[in-house]
Each structure stands twice: as C-alpha cells, then as structure tokens.
Image (cartoon, rainbow, N blue to C red):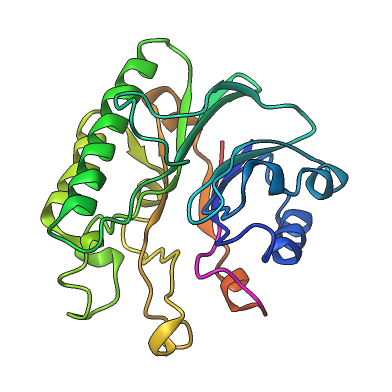
Amino acid sequence: MKIATFNINNVNRRLPNLLAWLKTARPDVACLQELKAGQNQFPERALREAGYAAAWVGERTWNGVAILVRKAEPIVIRRNLPGDANDVQARYIEAAVNGVVVACVYAPNGNPQPGPKFDYKLAWLARLRRHVATLRKSGAPIVIAGDFNVVPTARDIYPTKSWDKDALVQPESRSAYAKLLQAGWTDAFRALHPEASGYTFWDYKRNRWPRDAGLRLDHILLSPDLVPRLKKAAVDRTVRGEDGASDHAPMWVVL
C-alpha cells in the first residue's frame, strides 16, 4: 500500500502536474493540502477519470485538504479537527481506506510570530495530538499524512539563518512535533533515512530550488502497529522542478 502526501498549492492550477504525477507514481492513497478551491471547485471528475475517487474539504482562499484513493472509495470519518467549535478552516479530513485510517492534515503556518497566528498554530497542533491519541484507542492502524508546517530539527533545513525568526523553526513548533513522536508516532521518512535531508519544500523566492535550499515540512506519521510494515519512504523531488510546479514535492511511504 503506497500512501503519499502532497501540498499541491492550488489543485486546479496544478491539475496537469498532479495528474502527471498520479499516472507515474500510482499511489494507492494521496493526501493533498492547500487546495485553494471551494467545495464546488474541486476537480472531482478529472481525478475520477484518472482512476481516483476523492473526499475533500474545500476552502476558496488558502486552505483545503483532500484524500484521493485508487481503485476504492474513501470512507469519510470526519471533516474537521475536534476541539474548537469556532475553527472553520479547512485543515483536516479523516477516512478509512482498505482497513487503514488515514488523517490528512494541513497545519497552520503560524506567521508572523509571536502573535495570534502562532498561538493558533500551537493550539491546532495540540488539538491534533489529543485527537490522534483518541484515534489510537480504536485499535485501528493509523497514518497521519500532510504538511505539518514544522521543520523538526536543524538537519531538516539547509544551512542558513534566514529562517530563524520563522514560525516553522521555533522551539515551540518543534516541541509540538516532538510530542507526537514521544507519544508513540513514528516519522516514517526519518525511520528509514536517519541522515538524509528529505527536503519537501523549496520556496519560489531567492533561487532556492536550484540551490537545493529546502525544508522538510511534509511528514507521514505511523501508529506503532504499522511500523513493522514500513518498507519504503521517499520524496519525489523531480516533481518540484517541473514547469508550473507546486513549491512542495510529494513524499510517500510503502507499507
């Protein structure tokens, strides 16, 4: 079972890129973030013609998440992250796929920090931690995949000081991510590649893609019962270099 995560950065604008990647990579499950499309603007027909059923939560401006499934239908469990009834941002969707619970997440960026957006980021990650702890009690195998908007450690970013004040690298952000690992979740890429950079994001600015000035923001976390079944984990870096590409590359695992 191949499960991928891909911050597509506007699903309609990048649809040709997405379809080309799906055709070559053939993930069984693909979690998308940053759809930048309203609920009625999602390209469901084009994806179904490409062999993928979809469940999604749209948002017209910035957010939006989706779970694509090949040769099956996702069974949606929930379309929002519990814990804050006032939070209407489209950042979470959860579905059962072939016996595995897949949670697709798009964590808040948190900039500028300090401030309300950073507070929201930390609160959102705390809500995620509480919710997935509850999920674990179900006994189902669980995959949490998405753009966490956290650079977990210094080795997950190119040598630089230019991001030092950014919310992505703050100690509080890294601590929130570390708490997930301390609670028993396994960072799939790091489990198989303890020393590799594993960058998944290269900003459009300052020539960062040609310089390989990347950050590892997109992660797939596994519940303990899935760790023995982890066979592969990789980043499809070349996708970032294509014409019209997202500023992220897909990251995937094989179970």
Question: Where are the magenta residues, as a range?
Answer: 244-253
Main SS, magenta region, reads loop
- Does residue 171 appear to the left or right of 64 in the view shown? left
Q: Nearer the viewer, residue 13 or 246?
A: 13
Q: Nearer the viewer, residue 236 or 203?
A: 203
- Does residue 152 appear to the left or right of 22 in the view shown? left
Position of residue 141 relative to residue 114, above or below, is: above
Q: Quadrant of residue 20?
A: bottom right
Position of residue 85 relative to residue 22, above or below, is: above
Residue 106 spot, x, y in % from top left: 43, 46
In the rendered image, the quadrant that contains the C terminus is: top right
In the rendered image, the quadrant that contains the N terminus is: top right
- Number of marks in picture: 0
Q: Is residue 208 visible?
A: no
- Whether residue 250 is in magenta: the answer is yes
- Does residue 36 appear to the left or right of 121 in the view shown? right
Residue 102 spot, x, y in % from top left: 52, 30
Q: Is residue 71 visible?
A: yes
Position of residue 112 relative to residue 140, above or below, is: below
Residue extending farthest to the top is 138
- Whether residue 157 is in magenta: the answer is no
Q: Quadrant of residue 178?
A: top left
- Does residue 32 appear to the left or right of 205 in the view shown? right
Residue 60 spot, x, y in % from top left: 56, 51
Residue at image position (37%, 58%) is 217
